[in-house]
Structure formats: structure tokens, C-alpha cells
Image: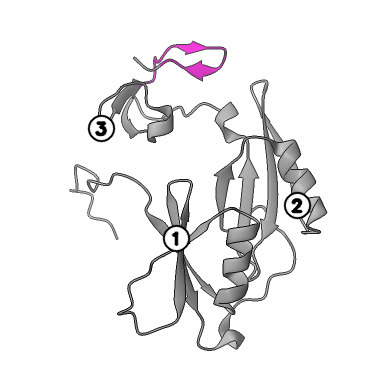
């Protein structure tokens, strides 16, 4: 249970990596490198277990070899309501064409919110972990509280400072559905 006396959140800066337990590190490296464009990077040699580190798009993926593959959950149906990681993409059409060429099974969805459309494509990695590709930048990030402090990735920061904190309030102006950050 989180102590309700806590007044400030942890001083986080960004998502560093996700760790995924896999039945075959080599098979997963192949998927993340050749399908999603991740690059294998040096991993400390002092770990006492097999694994691999990959990096791209500002986030790392740490693959951990499972000791007993019978303990891994078996997933065959693609369920967008399952745990997943989502990647913003440049072109949903290109993503769909490429994964069809690769003969990767996927589910496509479209979400509408106030006249804005979000396209989503869901697929599994070799171990059944859900991967989403989307054009989620179409939907503005609007805090629900009366006042919030958001840390935005450098690709969408509107200042040249090393860390840009944006104060948003419930009366934030919007232009064509997108918040204006001042």
C-alpha cells in the first residue's frame, strides 16, 4: 500500500528499459532486431544468467533467458487488452505492409476520440508478449487533475533546456484538439 502522506512522486526522468523473460534469447534478439529495429548493445558480463540488451527509440529491452520454459505463459490469441508496450510509428500503412510481408499475425484497431483517430496494430513477440504500433501522437495528452507537471520526451519539448517541465491546468488552451504548451 502506498503511504498517502507521500507528497511528491519519485524524481524520475524517463523510462530506461523493459525486461522480458524469453524461451530463446537468440530468437527474441532476431525479432527485436529485424522486426522492430532494436540494436544489440554491450551487457555487463557479471550477470550470472544468459540474456541480451538491445536499445533504440530511447528505450532499452533486456532479454532474460528463462531457466524453465514450461513456466512461461502460452499466448496465441492477440488481445489488445493484454499487457503490452507501444511504439509510435511514422506510417501505419508501412508498418502493416511490412508485417504482412513478414507473415506476422496481427490485429488492427481504430479508436476515435472527439474527431481524432488513433490507428493501432497489435502483434506478439516470439514469447507472446504484446507489441503495439500506433499513431498515438494524434491524441493530445490532457491531465485530468486541476494542475499537473509533465516531463515530455526531448522529441516534443518546446524549449532548449535539458529538462523541460510543463505546467498544465484544466484550462489549458487547445488548437485543433492539441494542447498549447506555454
Q: Can you say which quadrant of the picture contains the C terminus?
A: top left
Residue 13 percent across, percent down from the top left: 29, 44
The answer to whether marks 3 and 1 mark residues whose Cβ atoms lie closer than 8 Å is no
Q: Is residue 70 magenta?
A: no
Circle 3 is placed at which residue position?
Answer: 162
How far apart are the two marked residues, 3 and 1, measured between alpha carbons?
24 Å
Residue numbers of the magenta segment: 169-180
How far apart are the two marked residues, 3 and 2, measured between alpha carbons?
37 Å
Query: At 55% from the left edge and 75% from the top edge, which residue is drawn?
Result: 25
Pick whichever of labels 2 and 1 is earlier in the sequence.
Answer: 1
Identify which residue, 29 or 122, lies in the foreground: 29
Mark 3 or mark 1, whichever is nearer to me: 3
Query: At 38% from the left edge and 17% from the top edge, which residue is drawn?
Result: 181
> In the structure shown, which secondary structural element does the residue marked by tag 1 occupy?
strand
The answer to whether marks 2 and 1 mark residues whose Cβ atoms lie closer than 8 Å is no
Residue 12 percent across, percent down from the top left: 27, 47
Circle 2 is placed at which residue position?
Answer: 99
The correct choice, above or below, for 54 with respect to 7 in the image is below
The correct choice, above or below, for 13 with respect to 90 in the image is below
Pick whichever of labels 3 and 1 is earlier in the sequence.
Answer: 1
Circle 1 is placed at which residue position?
Answer: 18
Residue 160 in sight here: yes
Amino acid at each position: 500500500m502506498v503511504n498517502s502522506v507521500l507528497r511528491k512522486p519519485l524524481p524520475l526522468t524517463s523510462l530506461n528499459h523493459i525486461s522480458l523473460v524469453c524461451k530463446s534469447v537468440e530468437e527474441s534478439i532476431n525479432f527485436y532486431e529485424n522486426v522492430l529495429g532494436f540494436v544489440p548493445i554491450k551487457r555487463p558480463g557479471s550477470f550470472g544468467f544468459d540474456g541480451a540488451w538491445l536499445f533504440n527509440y530511447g528505450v532499452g529491452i533486456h532479454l532474460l533467458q528463462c531457466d524453465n520454459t514450461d513456466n512461461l505463459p502460452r499466448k496465441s490469441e492477440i488481445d489488445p487488452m493484454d499487457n503490452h508496450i507501444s511504439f509510435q510509428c511514422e506510417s501505419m500503412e508501412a508498418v502493416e505492409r511490412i508485417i504482412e510481408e513478414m507473415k506476422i499475425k496481427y490485429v488492427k484497431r481504430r479508436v476515435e476520440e472527439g474527431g481524432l483517430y488513433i490507428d493501432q496494430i497489435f502483434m506478439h513477440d516470439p514469447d507472446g508478449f504484446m507489441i503495439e504500433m500506433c499513431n498515438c501522437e494524434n491524441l493530445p495528452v490532457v491531465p485530468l487533475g486541476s494542475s499537473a507537471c509533465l516531463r515530455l520526451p526531448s522529441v516534443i519539448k518546446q524549449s532548449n533546456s535539458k529538462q523541460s517541465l510543463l505546467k498544465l491546468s484544466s484550462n489549458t488552451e487547445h488548437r485543433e484538439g492539441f494542447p498549447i504548451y506555454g
